[in-house]
Amino acid sequence: MNIMAVFAHPDDEIGCIGTLARHTARGDKVMLVWTTLGELASQFGDTSYEEVTRIRREHGAWVAEQIGAEHHFFEIGDSRMTGDRTEALALARLYARFQPNAVITWSDDHPHPDHRMTAKIAYDAITLARIPKILNEDQPAHIEPWREPVRFYQYYADASPYPEVFVDISESIDTSEAVMRYYQQFYKWKGTAEEYRGGRGRLGTLSGVKYAERFNVRSAHGRAVAYLD
């Protein structure tokens, strides 16, 4: 199984690290993707663009290494995403190369526009990756389309109309907490790793396990069934 996690900024991925770590431990391929370099983070103050983006790339690479994942950065521009066709097509071409069976991304209604636009292009790219004439517009080398069904998971949102699913991360909670602690110590967040673990524990209580992560799920281009149910 191939899983791609698509987010806007390095550290957005904290909500699914336990899930991704479970899959790499099982032998699945995972790729972490960020649509921007997160260069406008206020914690960096007047630090130069070059230094901020170097640090952000370093953070992404470190997290990917912790869970045994590939990683990729786009440079669409922090807080400049529009969710347009160009952005979705760039991601679709990455889909065609990586061939994901599942995608994890933001919810549709998050207050940050980059988060909403990332969710939009992550979903739009599923269809664009299926169409050879679109994938190969102005491309020097032919790109084969990716036409297999893709399960689309989003960070849980109370307002989402889509069903929820819990993933048991009891075996990967230490890795998940380590990633959270890595960012918390760098950015001096008020939330602690212990509080983070407690939150995952509360999700576990809701779903009958020790620790869990929570998503909404919708299918795109699902397999045919014999009859409607």
Image (spheres, rainbow, N blue to C red):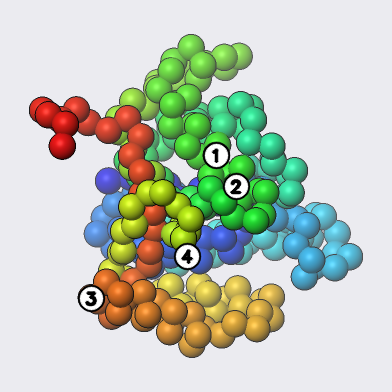
On the picture, is 119 further left or further right than 216? right
> Which residue corresponds to mark 4?
15
Mark closest to the chain's N terminus, 2 or 4: 4
On the picture, is 101 further left or further right than 12? left
Q: Nearer the viewer, residue 148 or 56?
A: 148
Whether tag 2 and tag 3 are in contact, CB under 8 A, the answer is: no
Image location of residue 22, percent across then percent down: 31, 64
Q: Name the amino acid type tagged 4.
A: Gly
Q: Distance between the Cα atoms at labels 2 and 4?
A: 16 Å
Mark closest to the chain's N terminus, 1 or 3: 1
Residue 208, label in figure: 3
Q: Residue at x 66, y 48 (%)?
A: 114
Nearer the camera: disc 2 or disc 4: 2
Residue 116, label in figure: 2
Image location of residue 215, percent across then percent down: 39, 58
Whether tag 1 and tag 2 are in contact, CB under 8 A, the answer is: yes
Mark closest to the chain's N terminus, 4 or 3: 4
Location of residue 168 with respect to 56 vertically, above or below? below
Circle 2 SS class: helix
Q: Name the amino acid type tagged 2.
A: Arg
Q: Distance between the Cα atoms at labels 1 and 3?
A: 32 Å
Q: Name the amino acid type tagged 1.
A: Lys
Image location of residue 141, percent across then percent down: 51, 17
